[in-house]
Image: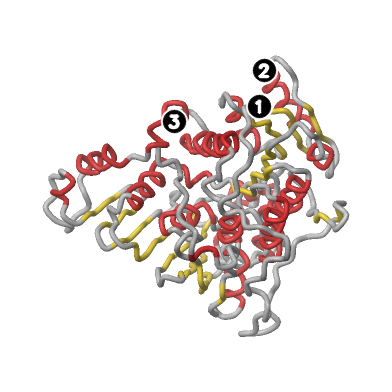
Amino acid sequence: MLAGLGASVIGAAGGCATEKPTLILPTGPGVLSSDFSSTRPRPAGQKPVNTLTTAPIEKVRVAVIGLSRGMTHVHTCLGIEFAEVVAVCDLRDDRAQKAAADVEKKYGKRPAVYSGTENIWEQMAARDDIDAVYIATPWNWHVPMGLGAMSHGKHAFIEVAAALTIDDCWKLVDASERLQRHCVMLENCCYGENELFVLNLARQGVFGELTHAECAYIHDLRSMLFSLGTEGDWRRNFHWEYNGNLYPTHGLGPVAQYLGVGRGDQFKHIVSMSSPEMSLTHFRDTTKPNGGRHANEKYICGDMNTSLIKTELGRTIMVQHDVVSPRPYSRINCLYGTEAVFFDYPARFSVNRPKEYGLDANDTEDWLSDKDLQTMRDKFTHPLWKKLQERAKGGGHGGMDFVMSWRLLDCIRRGATPDSVVYDAAAWSSIIETSVHSVANNSALVNIPDFTRGLWKTMTPLGIAEA
């Protein structure tokens, strides 16, 4: 990633100015901005993008900005026959040259290389031989780069989270609608084997009526947060600036798709609370990373943030964030329905009337045995995973990175609407600022904007590779 970069905001004329996205914090206990979470009307001339299709193309020409995380995207695209990496960009020239060398080794020709200055990416975005831009940079750069890519006619593929503020979420929504370009958040966890399995179970009606979901990003990142020259250099900053859920979408994206959020249901409001901040300070004080140079830093983000989301249909979602406690990784990945319940980490499943599925279990007193769970996998493994699992082996994050890019680029190649659009990117990302607001206001209820502007009531779920 472009470590060390400041923020950048696209101005009215398309230029850049250094300015950090700012969360709209409350002015006192229980006081919220009156227009903070209101749904904004669609400006005249803008068209929805929930069913946006584009002209099919034989090969998707790709550019990648940010070549730390972005190297995974480069290598993934090199393994997709209908994709071509035509340009790479990073502030650090060594990273850009390494990526270019890998591309040249594959294609026999070198891609265009952009490096060395903060805004060099703008020159790349202006090229006329790029269809889609992967944006894998520090969070502050996601929105300006996404806006810049779309303003030049490219589809924007933005790493998580797509935006930090509600205002920036609306900027992405308006730009996608105005320019009729796709703006997709690269939420790879939607394409994990278990997530696709649960999605297929839900789509096939195995869960019955859906009632509740639980999800999280629980990942011990303490060492990384103090690792100089990595994303820890900028990611740690958020721990002394904001108290809330700083990274909601890995867990929330998949369960939002299970529940049809944005397509038949919608986030309504959130209540959020944080535990005390102790673990990051304790780790710093006991290990004294980097010779103790961080001794005066004061962190405010609680170790564990727990948020509850209510949907328009009355369903509930628990989403947690903890990257500083000494515990194993988990996204929880839980779904409740009237007929079945699934919990992940490790995968556990319980279903009414197990005999109907050819299972040995007699009731729901215990989770299904490994044998019965495998029987359900044999029946309901998602067709997309079945199709790509061999090609995905060895790919990033257990293969989900490959499946995500293959599916997304295949949609662009065919001119089809991707599995998630800008409304999803905005809704899932909005939990950052709405959780911060709730925590700052003694866990007050905070409304979540409807980025579809009412379309969720009539939008039907996308196929998400039904075949």
Q: Earlier in the sequence, mark 1 or mark 2?
A: 1
- Does 400 appear above or below 103? below
In this rendering, would 22 be left or right of 304? right
- Does 196 appear above or below 259? above
Label 3 crowd bin: few (<14), some (14–19), many (20+), radius 10 Å: some
The answer to whether the residue labelled 1 contacts the one labelled 2, judged by CB atoms less than 8 Å apart, is: yes
Label 1 crowd bin: few (<14), some (14–19), many (20+), radius 10 Å: many
**Circle 2 sits on which residue?**
107
Indicate which disc residue 388 carries. 3
Assign a secondary structure to mark 1. Answer: strand
Q: Amino acid at mark 2?
A: Tyr
Taking the spot 32% from the left edge, 61% from the top edge, the residue there is 336
Taking the spot 74% from the left edge, 43% from the top edge, the residue there is 153
Taking the spot 44% from the left edge, 58% from the top edge, the residue there is 260
Q: Amino acid at mark 3?
A: Leu
Taking the spot 70% from the left edge, 82% from the top edge, the residue there is 27
Classify residue 302 by image quadrant: bottom right
- The span from disc 3 to disc 2 (Cα, nearest Å) is 23 Å
The answer to whether the residue labelled 3 contacts the one labelled 1, judged by CB atoms less than 8 Å apart, is: no
Q: Amino acid at mark 1?
A: Glu
- The span from disc 1 to disc 2 (Cα, nearest Å) is 9 Å
**Circle 1 sits on which residue?**
84
Assign a secondary structure to mark 3. Answer: helix
Assign a secondary structure to mark 2. Answer: helix
* Residue 274 visible in the displayed image: yes
